[in-house]
Image (cartoon, grey):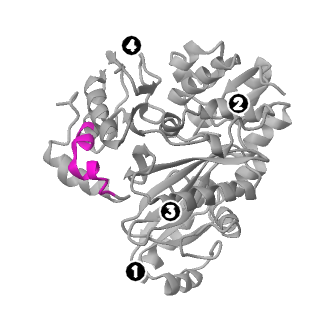
């Protein structure tokens, strides 16, 4: 069926992004919001807005009953979950469908299958996708854990089977540490995800984090090439690029083909991301997980391919086939995204809610700023500190970095400390320019290079 109206079950910049994509397609938009978000930009832009609860996410954005009730009240055809919150909750997807609406994403069964990292790993192996050496499924005892490490060696990661976004991971370096961390990791996984299942994976030293954007309509499956996501702090992405600039052409082809094979193996519908670790020395990639939703970093893929991924999600969910074939998709130029957060690097990146007193957004060819901000907006203290994403495109990576430096200098967000100066320092760093980084690079760089620069945002300084 054609989607005529949609409820956005999210907040912040992704809600704004979805509303704009929907309006381009002529779709009526309904925005839910908590009591703390009555003044957010998405509420102002939507055709209708409905309050669903108090500030606490569990009582609002994570409250399935409240979201479904709002969708029924608004009489929408579909629900878009964005990222985070309920976006990878199979029960929510099922509830939307049971209520007679379209869930803009894969089925609840697909979300549960791919959201369980152990099951996803098994699917990947069956599809012929290389996986990181580790346990064969979930493990429930220390004896099993020690048997695995006897094969893989140390260090290893203890990973929550139901984890995501870099959460639920512990690195252990020897048998004694494994004895201590194993029961704690299981208890933490149960408390955080409602599932105490864990498994082990070998740590790939100096690995890079590379992910492939996939699209599927249940019968046809394509990739939109890959993204480089190795600049991370506490396993949370800070800076992303597309394409991954150091991949040999043959490795890129194998990587992207493997992601499509995995999508086909589960009959994937919608947009998703297959994530990998890549070992530069051996030119080997290993499957990590599948994210069954739109990603924060999706704009860099849009910038190099010209495909509007959110619009494609709407079309597929409405019953249409993919509007592109693999032969239609090619890479043009290079794109970089900087996540701009309301955090104070001088104080351990402490979140810093407050009122935006000034906002100046850079403009010009190849510059995009996805944000929820406007002057006078009060950032509430209850949610993620992401303010927006500065995305810049260039004919090649060098041109992109030069344009990024200019755009960062023009971006002004006053009233709260931000991470703009962090990205300015990264854009000017010789190692970053050379691509000489990996998943552990940024944390060391913050302690050395950034600290030497003062480690402070321009606003605070």
The local secondary structure at tag 1 comes to loop
Crowd class of label 4 (few under 14; some 14 to 19; many from 20; radius 10 Å): some
Give the distance between the C-alpha atoms of the residues marked 1 and 2, in whole angstroms: 48 Å
The local secondary structure at tag 4 comes to loop
Q: Nearer the viewer, residue 1 or 345?
A: 1
The total of numbered circles placed on residues is: 4
Q: Which mark is residue 251?
A: 3
Q: Which residue is mark 2?
A: 314
Q: Disc 1 or disc 2, which is closer to the eye?
A: 2
Q: Nearer the viewer, residue 94 or 262?
A: 262
Query: What secondary structure is the stretch in magenta mostly built from?
Result: helix
Q: Earlier in the sequence, mark 3 or mark 4?
A: 3
Q: Which mark is residue 376?
A: 4
Crowd class of label 1 (few under 14; some 14 to 19; many from 20; radius 10 Å): few
Q: Which residue is mark 1?
A: 174
Q: What residue do we see at 42% from left, 44% from top?
A: 241
Give the distance between the C-alpha atoms of the residues marked 4 and 2, in whole angstroms: 32 Å
Give the image location of residue 44, x and y in percent: 55, 13
Q: What residue do we see at 44% from left, 68% from top?
A: 283
């Amino acid at each position: 069926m054609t989607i005529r109206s949609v409820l956005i079950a999210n907040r912040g910049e992704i809600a704004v992004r979805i509303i704009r994509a929907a309006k381009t397609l002529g779709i009526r938009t309904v925005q839910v919001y908590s009591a703390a978000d009555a003044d957010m930009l998405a509420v102002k832009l939507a055709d209708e807005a409905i309050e669903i609860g108090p500030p606490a996410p569990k009582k609002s954005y994570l409250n399935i009953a409240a979201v479904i009730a709002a969708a029924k009240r608004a009489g929408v055809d579909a629900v878009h979950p964005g990222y985070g919150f309920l976006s990878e909750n199979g029960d929510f997807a099922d509830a939307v469908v049971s209520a007679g609406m379209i869930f803009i994403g894969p089925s609840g069964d697909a979300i549960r299958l791919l959201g369980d990292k152990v099951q996803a790993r098994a699917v990947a192996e069956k599809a012929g996708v290389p996986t990181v050496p580790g346990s064969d499924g979930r493990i429930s005892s220390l004896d099993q854990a020690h048997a695995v490490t006897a094969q893989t060696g140390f260090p290893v990661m203890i990973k929550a089977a139901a984890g995501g976004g870099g959460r639920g991971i512990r690195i252990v370096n020897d048998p004694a540490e494994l004895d201590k961390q194993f029961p704690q990791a299981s208890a933490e996984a149960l408390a955080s995800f409602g599932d105490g299942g864990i498994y082990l994976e070998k740590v790939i030293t100096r690995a890079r984090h590379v992910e492939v954007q996939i699209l599927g309509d249940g019968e046809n499956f394509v990739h939109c090439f890959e993204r480089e996501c190795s600049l991370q702090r506490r396993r949370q992405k800070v800076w992303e690029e597309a394409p991954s600039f150091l991949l040999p052409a043959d490795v890129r082809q194998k990587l992207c083909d493997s992601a499509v094979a995995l999508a086909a193996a589960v009959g994937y519908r919608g947009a998703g991301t297959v994530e990998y670790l890549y070992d530069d020395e051996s030119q080997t990639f290993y499957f990590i997980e599948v994210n069954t939703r739109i990603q924060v970093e999706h704009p860099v893929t849009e910038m190099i391919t010209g495909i509007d991924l959110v619009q494609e999600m709407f079309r597929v969910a409405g019953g249409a086939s993919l509007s592109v074939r693999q032969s239609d998709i090619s890479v043009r130029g290079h794109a970089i995204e900087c996540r701009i957060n309301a955090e104070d690097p001088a104080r351990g990146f402490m979140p810093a809610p407050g009122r935006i007193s000034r906002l100046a957004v850079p403009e010009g060819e190849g510059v995009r700023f996805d944000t929820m901000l406007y002057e006078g907006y009060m950032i509430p203290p209850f949610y993620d500190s992401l303010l927006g994403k500065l995305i810049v495109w260039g004919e090649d990576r060098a041109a992109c970095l030069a344009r990024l430096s200019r755009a960062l200098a023009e971006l002004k967000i006053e009233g709260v400390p931000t991470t703009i100066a962090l990205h300015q320092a990264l854009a000017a760093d010789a190692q970053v320019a050379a691509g000489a980084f990996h998943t552990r690079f940024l944390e060391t760089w913050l302690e050395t290079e950034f600290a030497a620069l003062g480690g402070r945002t321009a606003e605070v300084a």
